């Protein structure tokens, strides 16, 4: 009789699927370029360590060309995507409680190139405050280590970012800039940026970033896991395909982004890497993530 009651209860009250996991990216153009949040979410859907089987919903918040510290400036309201009217980044975190928040932490910003003169928070101070707010809302902060330069100042910025991550007890860290530095040293012939765009990741650089996020979020090797043909945005100056743009239907992620981005999104462009190059970049991402992970846990 007891077994029968349990069976009836199970039929009447079926188990519900786990709530989708909210992945909220914060940053500027090297964060949203190539629809990075959407592409990361597709790769790690159901695979995030500690959240196996949970669907992943990507979002983005921020504006082009800005250090994320500016979100703390009094009265700041120049967001281009991700917030409701009158809402701030901290408001969004408190109200919407994202599960994981990858923040674009930038080498040149943490080195002081964007240091304020009005007494407002520095890059490191702002990121520290964001980490606390994310955890207070029940989520986990994540660093998207960003910096595509090749000089000593960029290398020093990576060390400061790593120190900041350790100060904030981070366990989620996408070591994109570090992985780029390794490729620069090992394969200077491999172009991570497009000749006409030195500000954003090129096709190979974007693939490397995806592999870094895959390693960081799944804690599994990305080698052989990423598709060799993948979604990208066009590079350099180009004219939109007006017919395609007129009929473009953005998906749930794309619809929340600035309308001017639809020109890039609507082109439907893809890139393809040969398997040897793709495997090399995935291997670099995996090795770099392990190396950085060891440094994060050092006493």
Image (cartoon, grey):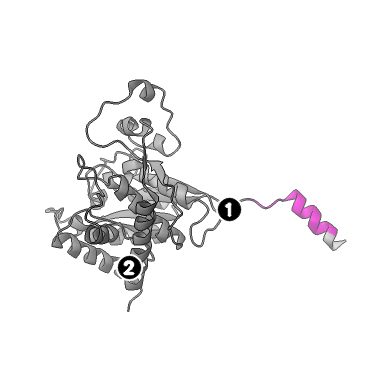
The residue wearing badge 1 is: 18
Task: Give the percent coordinates (x, y) of residue 59.
Answer: 40, 45
Q: Quadrant of residue 102?
A: bottom left
Q: Is residue 133 visible?
A: no
Q: Residue at x 42, y 39 (%)?
A: 253
The residue wearing badge 2 is: 292
How many numbered marks have been drawn onto this rendered protein structure?
2
Task: Give the percent coordinates (x, y) of residue 63.
Answer: 27, 42
Category of crowding for the residue at label 2, using alpha-carbon neighbours closer than 10 angstroms: few (below 14), some (14–19), many (at least 20): some
Category of crowding for the residue at label 1, using alpha-carbon neighbours closer than 10 angstroms: few (below 14), some (14–19), many (at least 20): few
Q: Is residue 229 left or right of residue 162?
A: right
Q: Is residue 216 left or right of residue 158?
A: right
Q: Is residue 288 left or right of residue 193?
A: right
Q: Quadrant of residue 233?
A: top left
Q: Is residue 297 above or below residue 254?
A: below
Task: Give the percent coordinates (x, y) of residue 34.
Answer: 34, 42
Q: Residue furthest right?
A: 1
Q: Is residue 176 visible?
A: yes
Q: Residue at x 24, y 49 (%)?
A: 191
Extent of the magenta region = 4-16
């Amino acid at each position: 009789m007891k077994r029968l009651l349990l069976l009836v209860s199970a039929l009447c009250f079926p188990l519900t699927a786990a709530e989708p996991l909210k992945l909220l990216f914060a940053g500027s153009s090297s964060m949203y370029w190539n629809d990075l949040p959407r592409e990361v979410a597709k790769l790690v859907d159901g695979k995030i360590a500690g959240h196996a089987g949970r669907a992943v919903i990507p979002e983005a918040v921020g504006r082009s060309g800005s250090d994320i510290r500016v979100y703390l400036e009094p009265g700041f309201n120049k967001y281009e995507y991700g917030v409701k009217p009158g809402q701030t980044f901290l408001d969004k975190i408190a109200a919407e409680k994202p599960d994981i928040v990858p923040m674009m932490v930038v080498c040149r910003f943490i080195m002081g190139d964007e240091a304020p003169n009005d007494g407002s928070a520095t890059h490191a101070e702002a990121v520290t405050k964001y980490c606390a707010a994310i955890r207070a809302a029940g989520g986990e902060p994540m660093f998207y280590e960003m910096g595509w330069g090749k000089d000593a100042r960029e290398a020093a910025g990576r060390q400061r970012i790593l120190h900041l991550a350790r100060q904030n007890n981070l366990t989620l860290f996408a070591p994109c800039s570090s992985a780029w530095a390794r490729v620069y040293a090992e394969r200077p012939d491999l172009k991570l940026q497009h000749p006409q765009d030195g500000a954003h990741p090129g096709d190979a650089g974007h693939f490397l970033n995806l592999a870094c996020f895959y390693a960081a979020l799944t804690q599994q090797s990305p080698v052989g896991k990423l598709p060799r043909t993948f979604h990208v945005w066009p590079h350099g100056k180009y004219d939109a395909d007006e017919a395609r743009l007129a009929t473009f239907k953005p998906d749930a992620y794309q619809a929340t982004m600035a309308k001017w981005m639809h020109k890039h999104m609507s082109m439907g462009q893809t890139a393809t890497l040969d398997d040897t190059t793709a495997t090399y970049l995935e291997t670099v991402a995996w090795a770099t993530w392990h190396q950085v992970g060891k440094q994060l846990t050092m006493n």
